[in-house]
């Protein structure tokens, strides 16, 4: 997957990764797990049109901080922009506190 390759090569410059649950070759849960292993500080948003909130793996990943935020689709551009701002603000605050 090109996105994961790019992230791996540039993991220190990313603040946020947004992923859909269903993708070819690698689902969003596994992508975000790999991303967090490479850079624990990066913020993550998972999106899906499917009911996933009761899924045990999803809940585990939320508790472990692998998924920082979830957005059920459809998502408006305003909702997405606000969530990105929120996650970036958390990222910046965590960077200051380091």
Image: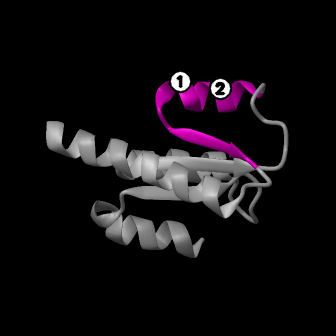
Instruction: Find out whether the residues at labels 2 and 1 contact each other: C-beta distance under 8 Å.
Output: yes
Q: Give the image location of residue 48, x and y in percent.
A: 76, 49
Q: Give the image location of residue 64, x and y in percent.
A: 49, 27
Give the colour scheme shown. Answer: one colour
Q: Which residue is mark 2?
A: 59
67 relative position to 49: left or right: left
Query: Does the magenta portion include 71?
Result: yes
90 relative position to 65: left or right: left
**Measured along the vertical axis of the image, is residue 2 above or below residue 86?**
below
Q: Give the image location of residue 55, x and y in percent.
A: 76, 28
Q: Residues within 10 Å of mark 1 (few under 14, many from 20)?
A: few
Q: Residue at x 71, y 59 (%)?
A: 76
Helix, strand, or loop for circle 2? helix
Q: Residue at x 82, y 49 (%)?
A: 49
Q: Give the image location of residue 81, x and y in percent.
A: 54, 59
Q: Quadrant of the N terminus?
A: bottom right
């Amino acid at each position: 997957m090109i996105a994961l390759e790019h992230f791996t090569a540039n993991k220190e410059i990313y603040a946020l990764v947004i992923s859909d649950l269903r993708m070819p070759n690698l689902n969003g849960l596994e992508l975000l797990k790999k991303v967090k292993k490479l850079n624990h500080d990066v913020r993550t948003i998972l999106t899906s049109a499917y009911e996933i909130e009761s899924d045990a793996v999803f809940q585990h990943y939320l508790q472990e901080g692998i998924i920082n935020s979830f957005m059920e689709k459809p998502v408006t551009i305003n909702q997405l922009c606000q969530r990105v701002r929120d996650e970036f603000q958390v990222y910046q605050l965590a960077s200051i506190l380091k």
